[in-house]
Image (spheres, rainbow, N blue to C red):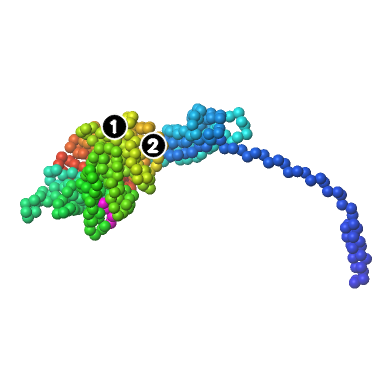
Amino acid sequence: MKFARTPFLLLLALCVVAHSCKEEPPNAPTQPPPPLLPQPVQTIALTVVDSASVEAWLKLSMPDTVKERRYRLYLNDSLLWQATLTKPDTLILIGLAPATTYRARAERLTTDTFNVTVDEKTFRTLDTTNQDYVWTVQTFGIGFGGILRDVCVINDSCIWAVGRIDSGLYDSLGAPIIYNAMRYDGHQWHYIQIKYDQSVFEHFSVIGFAENDVWLATGGRTAHWDGNRFTMAVIGGDRQGGILKLWGTSSSNIYAVGDLGTIAHYDGTTWRRMESGTTAHLVDIYGTPDGKSVWVAGYRNSPFQSCLLSLENGQCRTIWQTGQTSPPSYASVLSLWTSGSSEFVVLGNATAHFHSRLAQNIARPQQFLMSGGGFCVRGNARNNLFAGGQVGILWHYNGAHWKRFADLSRSFDWYRSIGVGNALVVAVGQRGGAALVAIGRKQP
């Protein structure tokens, strides 16, 4: 068997040699690579700037170099708008339905079929919130000059309210015992008496960042509660009026506004006065959660003044002021609020208006009126905000509709301030001469 395989191996070797000596065909000529096509240019951009429950702000943009600037805007394949863009970008406000997903599509109309002329975005609107609340209304004090001017909801078991509460009792020297703050522990309210140089002054504002980090203001002074004791400070400066409202993002970034155009800022160490450019009484202040955009409401009866201010980068700017700039559709600014989105809310003496930071000259009035005037607007989301005022009027906005709590309406009830938590809302003010608190608890 060993020698029988030899012819087969020899034949296999010859086949390999013959194949290796076979002449190969000549190589085909090398073809040059195809030329690179020019890359398309994006000539229109669509941005969903902001969306709420029943509306959204869309922005359309084109480069300045684009000459043909006609466009169409579609919403879910239906033509919504067709126009010519006369500047680099434009804002469009559209009405929508709550809790709905939308597809927006922008097309640039052009004879140049090469350039990309389409941009498309998908977004979803916010849902509405529950408007079913059960209310508990209480009065405190004996009814001689009692009033609660501000409230702060830290959580459902830590709520502060400030003002003046006359206990009806007298000390050993015959002086009336007055309290200027109250604290709610989730079950009941407790009176608190804070003294400044052995005197008890009515508080006008309170803010809190935690249970052991609460700030109160009276006149030109503040008191800070650290969980164990109060530390007092004086807000100095010439022409410094009394403080009417506090707002901030932390204990190292607090603003105080008040009488005669008073604005001051606290950086965690020092209070510093700021120029406001007005002598109106600055009655409210609110800003975005990051503190980058802050608005101030000003109002004064005699002589009549009203203004809307903006604080950015440590500077104060007048957005609107009576007699100086073109007035919007309201004559006074008493309170304001923002969720931190592009929109903020301004409460005049009878109506609330929605503004956009992107188009502040556009004020959209809401459909409700307050008999005698409103005092405060507050919320914790743009689909969960409240507005209150005279004759016991309190309204709730769920993102689509305003609801008035008619069972709270009483001729002698005034709601001065509102605090909003996750599952409750607290409105404080006065009933005749007694301090008034209304707590609304959201139902499942």
Q: Quadrant of the N terminus?
A: bottom right
The image quadrant that residue 269 belongs to is: bottom left
Q: Residue at x 49, y 29 (%)?
A: 86
Q: Which residue is mark 1?
A: 322
Residue 175 makes an appearance in the image: yes
Q: Which residues are magenta?
A: 212-216
Q: Position of residue 328 (x, y in %)?
A: 33, 30
Residue 427 makes an appearance in the image: no
In front: 405, or 395?
395
Disc 1 vs disc 2: Cβ atoms closer than 8 Å?
A: no
Q: Position of residue 142 (x, y in %)?
A: 12, 46
Q: Residue at x 23, y 51 (%)?
A: 234
- Which disc number belongs to residue 356? 2
In the displayed structure image, the side of residue 269 where residue 1 appears, left or right? right
In the displayed structure image, the side of residue 31 where residue 48 appears, left or right? left
Q: Nearer the viewer, mark 1 or mark 2?
A: 1
The image quadrant that residue 292 belongs to is: top left
In front: 47, or 184?
47
Q: Residue at x 14, y 42 (%)?
A: 433
Alpha carbons under labels 1 and 2: distance apart: 20 Å
> What amino acid type should be assigned to the residue bearing mark 2?
Ser
Q: Position of residue 79 (x, y in %)?
A: 51, 29
Q: Position of residue 256 (x, y in %)?
A: 27, 46
Secondary structure, mark 1, is loop
> What amino acid type should be assigned to the residue bearing mark 1?
Thr
Q: Work out whether mark 1 precedes mark 2 in sequence or the reverse, and give the earlier one.
A: 1
In front: 313, or 424?
313
- Which disc number belongs to residue 364? none
> Is residue 286 highlighted in magenta?
no
Local crowd at mark 2 within 10 Å, few (<14), some, or many (≥20)?
some
Q: Residue at x 24, y 49 (%)?
A: 235
Whether 389 is drawn above or below 424: the answer is above
